[in-house]
Image (cartoon, rainbow, N blue to C red):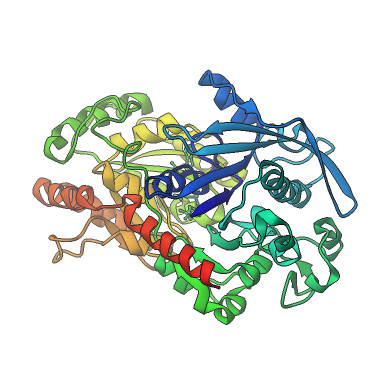
């Protein structure tokens, strides 16, 4: 099968979260399964810098072309590289006005929010590149709202083009809350016929909603864990689209994300100060020692380091942590938190860290290497998410013998089995249900009590490290979904 991925993020080239991890690793596994895969992403400044740092020069595929749609024209240059560590083609769509910006998701130089325009351009450019390069995808696999217009373009006459005559679309929801919604007047940006401005297409309560359009028009819809697939069909978690999802539930699939087990391997990870596996967990102490030093803590084997690596946005639930942080520190925890996002959350965390420099360290920023050192050096990893489509951090933590303390929602409930004192043969972490600071405190405190019992802790670590989160099983399910899409 010929599969084309269209995505806004690809790890390690340019990412802000798990979307990048998935689109950087799943295509490689599909390739190993025998599919012909190509990945399209915008050529952001961050991507350019990544290639510079790694001494790679992507080569230009074609002379710069003009992409025109609706009332718009913009230039696109297509460059080719490969996904690191593979021969999977990575096609970079360059346009400096849209993508050469301070951050991946930044406003236009004039201060305007042109998010819909830049990703509409990206979608149009992917189509044009396939036509010019004569790539005829069997499956066009789109991810999140940025590429949500592609299934609609396919429906709207693109199948008349020889490259897309047989193409079917698969749309993966990584996060239902980011829908790309915009005012009604933005519809003209899409260049689509007015029949797509309807409640059974892009219109949603008077707004333009790309996420809704993709859910309705893709041949198959997937999301990133079975539990989230169920949750988003309820009013509580449906972000206003639960009715739409229920209406097409026959084509909604929950497929648990995998992780790149080569990149995330404590026995070989070049970003860790010490290496270990399930049989040499003693050496994890070296990683803890190094993290303690880096955080400015005096090393103590007895005091657990509770780590966190996260975008600091409401989704991630740090508003539950902040009210009980001082109490957790008082109870003996040490906190090592890396994240960036909303200023109020950043400021509150930094404030508490400044009051407890010996026990609490907060790094504001995005730092992949430090993230690895936290997964390796911490004893526990906190994820108090309000909702969590899948979550990759808890899987990285489990693989690194670091026990997750999570709110049992979305994919966290599919991957973390909380210890309840009786299920030591399977448990691999700790959990709570109510979105309340006290419940977070209690779950962390229970984890801290169990940390004192070396043999229980080792058992739970071993259970976690034995979990198989490799992509192979999930990739086989994607394969089945692709086949179903082709039959539609
Ligand atoms: P989400 O995609 O919702 O942010 P996931 O758990 O799926 O959540 O993925 C988060 C990914 O982003 C992980 O690879 C994590 O290590 C990474 N990450 C998040 N914040 C940071 C940060 N501040 N520095 C480094 N890596 C981060
Ligand atoms: C989103 C979700 C996260 C998921 C990731 C990759 O960013 O918030 O839970 O793991 O996508 O699918």
x and y, in percent, of residue 40 in the image: 60, 43
x and y, in percent, of residue 58 in the image: 60, 26
Q: Is residue 421 visible?
A: yes
Which quarter of the figure is the C terminus placed in? bottom right
Q: Nearer the viewer, residue 288 or 180?
A: 180
Question: What residue is drawn where x is 48% and y is 70%?
Answer: 484
Q: Farthest residue in the top direction?
A: 55
Question: Considering only vertical position in the picture, is 197 above or below 120?
Answer: below
Question: What residue is drawn where x is 74% and y is 69%?
Answer: 202
Q: Quadrant of residue 309?
A: top left
Q: Farthest residue in the left direction?
A: 455
Q: Nearer the viewer, residue 144 or 69?
A: 69
Number of numbered discs present?
A: 0
Q: Is residue 327 visible?
A: no
Question: Considering only vertical position in the picture, is 140 above or below 461?
Answer: below
Question: Considering only vertical position in the picture, is 207 above or below 345?
Answer: below
x and y, in percent, of residue 30 in the image: 42, 49
Q: Nearer the viewer, residue 367 or 262?
A: 262
Horizontal side of residue 333 vs 453, given as left or right:
right
Q: Farthest residue in the front direction?
A: 162
Q: Quadrant of residue 67?
A: top right
Question: Considering only vertical position in the picture, is 307 above or below 421?
Answer: above
Question: What residue is drawn where x is 75% and y is 35%?
Answer: 95
Q: Nearer the viewer, residue 258 or 70?
A: 70
Question: What residue is drawn where x is 55% and y is 46%?
Answer: 345
Horizontal side of residue 239 vs 266, given as left or right:
right
x and y, in percent, of residue 99 in the image: 71, 36
């Amino acid at each position: 099968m010929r599969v084309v991925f269209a995505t806004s993020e690809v790890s390690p080239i340019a990412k802000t979260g798990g979307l990048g991890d998935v689109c950087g690793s799943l295509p490689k596994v599909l390739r190993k399964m025998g599919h012909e895969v190509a990945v399209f992403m915008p050529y952001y400044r961050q991507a350019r810098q990544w290639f510079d740092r790694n001494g790679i020069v992507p080569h230009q595929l074609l002379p710069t072309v003009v992409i025109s749609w609706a009332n718009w024209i913009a230039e696109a240059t297509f460059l080719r590289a490969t996904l690191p560590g593979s021969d999977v083609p990575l096609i970079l769509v360059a346009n400096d006005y849209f993508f050469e910006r301070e951050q991946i998701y930044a406003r236009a130089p004039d201060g305007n929010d042109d998010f819909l325009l830049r990703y509409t351009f990206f979608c149009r450019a992917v189509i044009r590149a396939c036509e010019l390069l004569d790539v005829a995808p069997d499956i066009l696999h789109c991810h999140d709202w940025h590429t949500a217009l592609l299934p609609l373009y396919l429906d709207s006459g693109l199948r008349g083009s020889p490259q897309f005559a047989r193409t079917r679309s698969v749309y993966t929801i990584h996060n239902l809350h980011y829908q790309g919604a915009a005012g009604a007047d933005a519809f003209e940006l899409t260049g689509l016929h007015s029949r797509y401005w309807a409640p059974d297409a892009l219109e949603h309560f008077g707004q333009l909603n790309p996420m809704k359009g993709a859910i309705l028009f893709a041949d198959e819809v997937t999301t990133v864990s079975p539990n989230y697939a169920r949750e988003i069909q309820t009013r509580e978690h449906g972000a206003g689209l639960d009715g739409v999802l229920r209406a097409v539930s026959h084509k909604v699939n929950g497929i648990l994300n995998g992780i790149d087990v080569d990149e995330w391997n404590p026995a070989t990870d070049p970003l860790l100060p010490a290496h270990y596996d399930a049989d040499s967990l003693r050496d994890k102490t070296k990683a803890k020692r190094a993290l303690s030093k880096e955080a400015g803590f005096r090393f103590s084997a007895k005091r657990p380091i509770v780590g966190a690596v996260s975008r600091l946005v409401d989704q991630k639930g740090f508003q539950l942590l902040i009210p009980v942080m001082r109490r957790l520190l008082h109870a003996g925890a040490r906190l090592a938190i890396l994240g960036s996002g909303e200023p109020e959350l950043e400021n509150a965390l930094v404030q508490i860290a400044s009051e407890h420099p010996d026990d609490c360290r907060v790094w504001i920023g995005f730092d992949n290497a430090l993230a690895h050192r936290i997964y390796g050096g911490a004893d526990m990893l906190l994820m108090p998410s309000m909702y969590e489509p899948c979550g990759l951090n808890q899987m990285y933590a489990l693989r690194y013998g670091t026990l997750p303390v999570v709110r049992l929602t979305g994919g966290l409930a599919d991957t973390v089995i909380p210890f309840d004192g009786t299920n030591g043969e399977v448990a691999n972490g700790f959990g709570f249900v109510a979105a309340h600071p006290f419940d977070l405190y209690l779950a962390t405190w229970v984890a801290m009590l169990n940390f004192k019992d070396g043999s229980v802790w080792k058992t739970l670590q071993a259970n976690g490290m034995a979990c198989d989160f490799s992509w192979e099983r999930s990739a086989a399910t994607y394969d089945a979904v692709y086949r179903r899409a082709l039959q539609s």
